[in-house]
C-alpha cells in the first residue's frame, strides 16, 4: 500500500529518462496526488530545488516540476510497481515532503483540479 512521502521512478526506457515521483497526500478514495522531480534546466520552474543528498535518487540539482502534478489511482501505482513499469524508491524525509508541499500550493503551474483535491485531503 502506498503512503504519503513514498516515491517511485517512472519514465521512458528508450531514452533512459526517469523521473522521481513523490506521493504528497495520503490515499483518499483510492487516489493520491503526486509531483515529479526533474533535472534543473534553464526553463525549469525553480520554486523548489532538490539537492543531492536530500533523496538517494537525486545525484544533481533538480527541481519539482509542479506542472506535472497529477491525481493518480493507488491501484495504478501499485500495479505499475508490481509489473516493473515503475520502481519503488526510498520515501522522502519529512523535511523534504514539507518543502515540496509548500511549493505545491505556491506554484502558479500546479493544475487547479489537482490543487483542489490536495486541499480537500490535506488540512494545513
Image: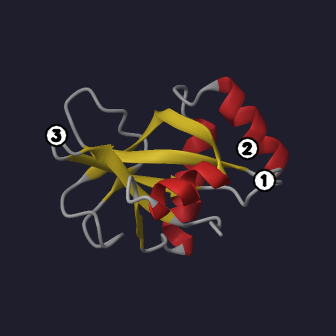
Dot 1: what SS?
Answer: loop
Image quadrant holding the N terminus, namely: bottom right
Q: How many marks?
A: 3
106 or 9: which is nearer to us? 9
89 or 38: which is nearer to us? 89
Q: Mark 1 = which residue?
A: 122
Distance from the alpha carbon under mark 2 to that under mark 1 = 6 Å
Relative image position of residue 7 (x, y in whole percent) = 47, 63
Q: Mark 2 = which residue?
A: 118
Dot 2: what SS?
Answer: helix
**Circle on res. 14:** 3
Relative image position of residue 17 (x, y in whole percent) = 21, 44
53 or 114: which is nearer to us? 114
Image quadrant holding the C terminus, namely: bottom right
- Give the farthest residue toward the left: 15
Distance from the alpha carbon under mark 2 to that under mark 3 = 33 Å
Q: Is residue 30 above or below residue 8?
A: above
Relative image position of residue 29 (x, y in whole percent) = 83, 50
Relative image position of residue 39 (x, y in whole percent) = 24, 45
Question: Which one is earlier in the sequence, the residue at label 2 or at label 3?
Answer: 3
Q: Is residue 68 above or below residue 37?
A: above
Amino acid at each position: 500500500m502506498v503512503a504519503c512521502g513514498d516515491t517511485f521512478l517512472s519514465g521512458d526506457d528508450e531514452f533512459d529518462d526517469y523521473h522521481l515521483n513523490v506521493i504528497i497526500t495520503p490515499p483518499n478514495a483510492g487516489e493520491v496526488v503526486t509531483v515529479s522531480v526533474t533535472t534543473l534546466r534553464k526553463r525549469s520552474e525553480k520554486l523548489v530545488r532538490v539537492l543531492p543528498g536530500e533523496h538517494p535518487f537525486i545525484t544533481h540539482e533538480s527541481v519539482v516540476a509542479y506542472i506535472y502534478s497529477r491525481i493518480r489511482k493507488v491501484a495504478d501505482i501499485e500495479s505499475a510497481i508490481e509489473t516493473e513499469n515503475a520502481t519503488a524508491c526510498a520515501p522522502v524525509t519529512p523535511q523534504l515532503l514539507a518543502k515540496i508541499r509548500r511549493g505545491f500550493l505556491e506554484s502558479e503551474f500546479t493544475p487547479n483540479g489537482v490543487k483542489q483535491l490536495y486541499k480537500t485531503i490535506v488540512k494545513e
